[in-house]
Amino acid sequence: MSKISIEEYFIYDSEQFFNDEEVRKYLTIDFIKQGELYNRNEHPEYSGVYFKLLAQLYRLRDGGADGATLAHVDYIIAYYIGLILRPVNSEGISLKYIDDAISLENDCNKFAIYENIKSMIINSHRQQKNKSDEIETKASSTIVNYFSFESNLFFDSNDVIEKLDYRLIHKGEDYYVGIGKEMENVYFKLLAQLLYLEEQDNVSDAALAHVNHMIAYYVGLFLHPTHGDYLGIKYAEEAIRLETDENKIRASEDIIFMINEP
């Protein structure tokens, strides 16, 4: 049994985290499944499990955890996103996490587990098409085309700064509410956009900074998931690190200031 209970770990903005030694022992698939049930009862408007796991991953990275420890958390996140939560663009996001786990792991036995999970994610998404596509294809607006479930439409490095703005984010919120999906899908679309750009050749730091800024704005000031302040600041700091435009740096600094306001 874990030293930390389900409630202690997953309660909103809990400061309970597993350390390097504990995480591989106690942060299991069964543990996150129980956490999912707990969060759906306590916070049905969004799933706090992913954001808790992301905060756990950042804490371990900041603490200098070894590759195998980080790989374990990446694997848990991949399983959760790809096979349990299944948000917008879940296949691509979960495969990125499992590929990170494979690249960090040095235990051959774990490689087999991670490769198996990767196959499960791919097969699961091939077998099940989201029924909302039938509704979404009836419209042709940028909002629908960009935010639709399993959409593979992303802005490239030349377009993202101009087209991905605050208005589009809030239109995305309205869209998901209108089709009966959680607003947190806006975050997952922005995350998928960021991962898409990171995989492109010759992507500009300005484009990456812009998407990090937009995620910081949405997570830190509007979505307010568990550890939203902490995660929002992380994304804003990354935007500042990548940005060279002083006005845009100040805009990300303003987000940190607003997040920290009492």
Image (cartoon, rainbow, N blue to C red):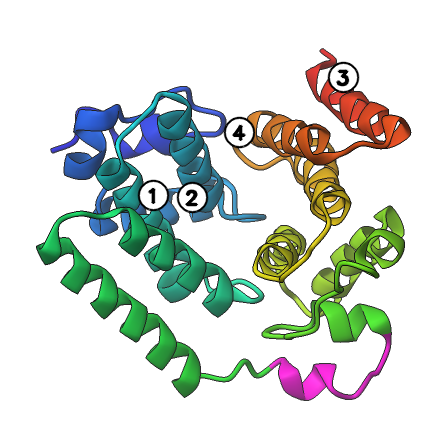
- Which mark lies nearer to you, 1 or 2? 2
Q: Distance between the residues labelled 3 and 1?
A: 31 Å
The three-letter amino acid code for the residue at tag 1 is: Gly
Q: Distance between the residues labelled 2 and 4?
A: 11 Å
Residue annotated with mark 4? 227
Give the residue drawn at x 36%, y 65%. Answer: 83
Residue annotated with mark 3? 257
Q: How far apart are marks 1 and 2 (CA)?
A: 7 Å
Q: Is residue 258 left or right of residue 165?
A: left
The three-letter amino acid code for the residue at tag 2 is: Val
Q: Where is residue 146 in the image (x, y as percent from the top left)?
A: 74, 69
Image position of 165 with respect to 83: above or below: above
Residue annotated with mark 2? 49
Image position of 64 with respect to 29: above or below: above
Dot 3: what SS? helix
Q: Distance between the residues labelled 4 and 3?
A: 16 Å
Dot 4: what SS? loop
The three-letter amino acid code for the residue at tag 4 is: His
Q: Where is residue 3 in the image (x, y as percent from the top left)?
A: 17, 24
Q: Give the range drawn in magenta.
A: 132-141
The three-letter amino acid code for the residue at tag 3 is: Phe
